[in-house]
Amino acid sequence: MNVYDSERVSTMLINNGWNMTKEVSEASLVIINSCSVREKPLQKLFSCAGRYLPYKKKYGLKIFIMGCVAQQLGDKILEKASYIDGVFGPGAEYMIPEVAEKEIFPFISNQTDLLEREEIFPASSRGNIFGKYTSYVTVMHGCNNYCSYCIVPFVRGKEVSRKSKELLDEIKLLADNGVLEVTLLGQNVNSYKDPDSGIDFADLLYKISEETPVKRIRFITSHPKDFNIKLAETFAQISKLMPYLHLPAQSGSDNILNMMNRKYTVSEYNKKLDMCRKACPDIALSSDFIVGFPGETEDDFNQTMLLVDKTGYDVIFAFNYSQRPFTQASLYEDNISSEIKFRRLNQLLDLQKQKIKEVRNRYLNRVVKVLVESKSPKGSSFMGRSEHNLITHVYDSTEDDVGKIIDVKINKILKNTIGGKKYERN
């Protein structure tokens, strides 16, 4: 979602006559998009901004902060870093071009009412300048779930769904620009509801598949409590929908899930996985996990290990618990030491490394379809993502393959990726 927001702001500026540069010494404006989901990115924000201070002093560079930390801290950012010229919370980013051009410095906007609009960005922000063949599209913003550890509802506001007509128009524009694959975004796409027609997220997937020319559709993120059979069946019924589901579990312990206010049990979570695998047996699964949540016992943690061991995820994203302001969990005693948190995190990640070898071996000697996007970081080959959202190196590919969906026979399962050669069907 941060990538999507950054792209919208960049597109607005470009349409207003600005040019992007990779050299900070050439820039007159730097915009830092900030995240406050965990403590570490918030800390990195100020060190990042400080690196641009010499350019401000020497060349008059203007420095803007946007995103969730801007919403969370507002004018406190200027108290800590007085050299910042603009602070724009989510919903206020549309003001960036005008503020920059009219030099309204210092500028601060983190009003919560700006988050309540259906269209956060104007139509002039639509486009794909970050990626030529793949793009993100936000279908909704905000969140109503109030998981006890999560700051998102406080910095992104309440759930607001965009009209399906606006979404279809945006996706058609992307397709006209050469985009073959879109990833639909939302804090909880499962609770999407068209403000006009009332259609749900599954219906939206059918509309996008039938009414736009994109070749591939993905979506993130789904909340397990709202995942249902209708959405599961879209994987079987929509050929454009890729067989990949990100379904964050967060913990394998009912006790911790209850304290997290996740509103489902491990048994219910597993039923959602079974539902999805019944509709699409070959689906690739990924998940998020938090270790060291206040009160997490060794038994609670072992239940998480058991869930990861039994499920067979293609990917997991695991983090140590980080206390966030405004949240219910910030009232709990953060009683798990850093040493225990890191030990548990490493145990979980080590288990996943072992499981990946088993899970990904199912791709060996199979033919997958890869949307080739760019050159591989090493060697002369090119790479892209398979249907299952795995980065795939195509060893005999050439630049002519970029922007095409090609058949690839997998002959290597690597640490974080897979690889193979082009396959000609008879």
Image (cartoon, rainbow, N blue to C red):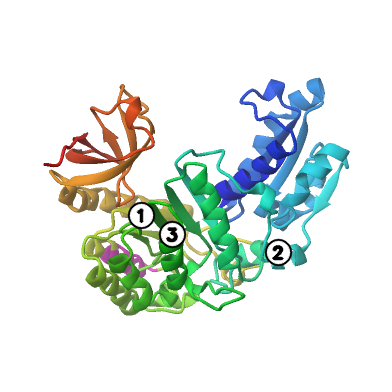
Residue at 61% over, 26% down: 22
Any part of residue 19 in sight: yes
Looking at the rendered structure, the kind of residue marked 3 is Phe
As helix, strand or loop, the secondary structure at mark 3 comes to strand
Picture layout, residue 166 above or below residue 19:
below
Q: CA distance from mark 3 to mark 2?
A: 22 Å
Q: Which residues are magenta?
A: 297-307
Instruction: Tell me the mark number nearer the camera, choosing from 2 and 1.
Output: 2
- Which residue matches tag 1? 316
Q: Quadrant of residue 61?
A: top right
- Would you say the residues marked 3 and 2 are in contact, meaning their CB atoms lie under 8 Å apart? no
Around disc 2, counting alpha carbons within 10 Å, would you say few (fewer than 14), some (14 to 19), or many (20 or more)?
A: many
Picture layout, residue 314 above or below residue 373:
below
Q: CA distance from mark 2 to mark 1?
A: 30 Å
Residue at 53% over, 62% down: 186
Residue 220 locus on image (x, y percent): 45, 60
Q: Quadrant of residue 26?
A: top right
Residue at 70% over, 39% down: 15
- Residue nearer the viewer, 275 or 423: 423
- Which residue matches tag 3? 219
Query: Magenta span: helix, strand or loop, mainly?
Result: helix
Looking at the rendered structure, the kind of residue marked 1 is Ile
Around disc 3, counting alpha carbons within 10 Å, would you say few (fewer than 14), some (14 to 19), or many (20 or more)?
A: many
- Residue nearer the viewer, 252 or 223: 223
Q: CA distance from mark 3 to mark 1?
A: 16 Å
Instruction: Tell me the mark number nearer the camera, choosing from 3 and 1.
Output: 3
Residue 141 locus on image (x, y percent): 60, 64
Q: Which mark is residue 115?
A: 2
- Residue nearer the viewer, 177 or 335: 177
- Would you say the residues marked 2 and 1 are in contact, meaning their CB atoms lie under 8 Å apart? no
Residue 131 colored in magenta in the image: no
Picture layout, residue 129 above or below residue 187:
above
